[in-house]
Image (cartoon, rainbow, N blue to C red):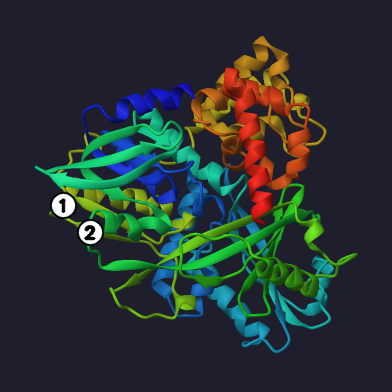
Amino acid sequence: MKLRNNNLDKLGNGVYDVLILGGGINGAVAAASLAAKGAKVALIDKGDFAGETSSNSSNLAWGGIKYLESYEFLLVNKLCQSRNHLMRSYPSTVKEVRFLTTIQKGFRYPPFFVFLGSILYWFIGRFFTQAPKYLSAGMLKRRESVIDTSSVAGGFEYSDCYLYDNDARFVFNFIRSALSYDCVAANYVESLGSERANGIWSTVARDNISGEIITIESKVLINACGPYVDQHNQMTQQNTEHRHLFSKGAHLIVDRITDSTRVLAFFASDGRLFFVIPMGPKTCIGTTDTQIESPHASVSDEDRQFILDNANTLLRLDRPLTTDDIIAERCGVRPLALKGEDGVADWVKLSRKHVIDINNQDQHLSIFGGKLTDCINVGDEVADIVTDLGIKLPYADKIWYGEADDAIKQEFVHQARLMGLDAMTSPSSSEPLTQRLWRRYGANAIAMLEAIRKDPASAQLLIENAEYLRCELEHTAEHEMITKLEDFLRRRSKIELVIPREDIINAPGLYKACKILFADQADAKLQEYVDSLQVQNEAA
């Protein structure tokens, strides 16, 4: 809490070059890019960082193969380049994964024709991944016995990439990078509106924890509020060329369906993509794709039944999945950029491409749409636009993204081997500690080696099956602005996605984790979490 309190004190002091509203993927990369290049940056989010859309994705960073069907070749080309760039920049986190795609009999295109599309996709992707392979129904069955091939016409295997951890953790690492370059960021701080006078934006914000009101001044205001961009633009009287339509996507987490590391891809009963995605010891299934009017969304009974019905139809399971098998749920709103105040569009065909509307006179940016795959481009574009608006960036050419230098990684690996770190890996984990700590924390993991060297108890797991060490909790408490227990369990980690909540609450190490994260507020924060779960259960 100390980091957050310090930043709250700073928010009302002086004039920032840029204030960013929203700590999702768009706001996070904008902050990381601008701060690294030397701008004086502040960022606030009314909830936790990556608290909504950016923590409810499929955990896939793909090149947009589905957009081939609508002939958006330029968009696919751009997304494939972005995907390849992400994989090169974050080799420990963004990894290639094979997709095993099944085409049912009677589908709108024959399997071989869809396979040819995957060849085109591979070509557009500069052959960066493994080549696609055409598969008969029998070959599909041999590769993955859990697929029900009784109504299958054929399929194919191709590659894209996914996030080894979770989307929210990936987003927060950009926030962490921005903080290291003196960005002043705070979660649970909500903008109540902004006004511009004498070339300066004054944003009135409320600390949603204490209720305190803060006025933040900035030369440039960036609206990166995700699904709430239009709402805040109304508050600031910004007229933009684009607006949002909304699509709701839901996923269910269940016990591991298959030991395969492939993503199983199907076309659901409504003709849209449906995935079975490996998630460590669990499996993520979905998604829905439903148009909604509001940026608020939750998993409905219809969503659950749709996902379960499709899983039970497309897979050969020992027994049908039911609601009792659901460990966790993810539900996010996908903001889709639509041009024109009264524009009408087939929302199903709208892509997730990002658009940045600029009001040069007011020095105001609105970021519409966007997806994780394209995040580096968003950060670069925002820096270019802010420069054009007259903000000097002393280190304009600085590379602001990517993992730490390979020499630093080799030093970490060398030290880890000398102290026998991997031998300390819990039997419940399939990933060696050396690999896991570097992937999550990069160069910051070196400090954890020192903590373990001084006190071997720092390598102990606190919460059973959670794969988080005491030294990780200590690092998180100091550097990752954990304001509520859910911030750690759901977004800095994926513990809440793979362990049932009742097991988390009853875990012997949970209170110890709270003491590390919140010190003398541990009891209150734990009770706050328990109460929030009760409210959610009653609402469901």
Q: Residue at x 27, y 54 (%)?
A: 235
Q: Residue at x 34, y 28 (%)?
A: 182
When asked about the image quadrant of residue 286, the answer is bottom right
Mark 1 is surrounded, within 10 Å at the Cα level, by few (under 14), some (14 to 19) or many (20 or more) other residues, namely: some
Tag shown at residue 362? 1
Q: Is residue 33 above or below residue 464?
A: below
Cα distance in 3D space between marks 1 and 2: 9 Å
How far across and down, in percent of the image, does residue 269 sit? 68, 79
Answer yes or no: is residue 128 visible.
Answer: no
Earlier in the chain: of badge 1 and badge 2, it is 2
Q: Is residue 471 above or below residue 335?
A: above
When asked about the image quadrant of residue 184, the answer is top left
Report the front residue among 292 and 383: 292
How far across and down, in percent of the image, does residue 87 sit? 52, 50
Q: Is residue 125 above or below residue 208?
A: below
Q: Is residue 194 above or below residue 133?
A: above
Report the front residue among 344 and 282: 344
Which residue is disc 2 drawn over? 238
How far across and down, in percent of the image, does residue 109 sit? 62, 87
Give amino acid for label 2: Gln
Mark 2 is surrounded, within 10 Å at the Cα level, by few (under 14), some (14 to 19) or many (20 or more) other residues, namely: some
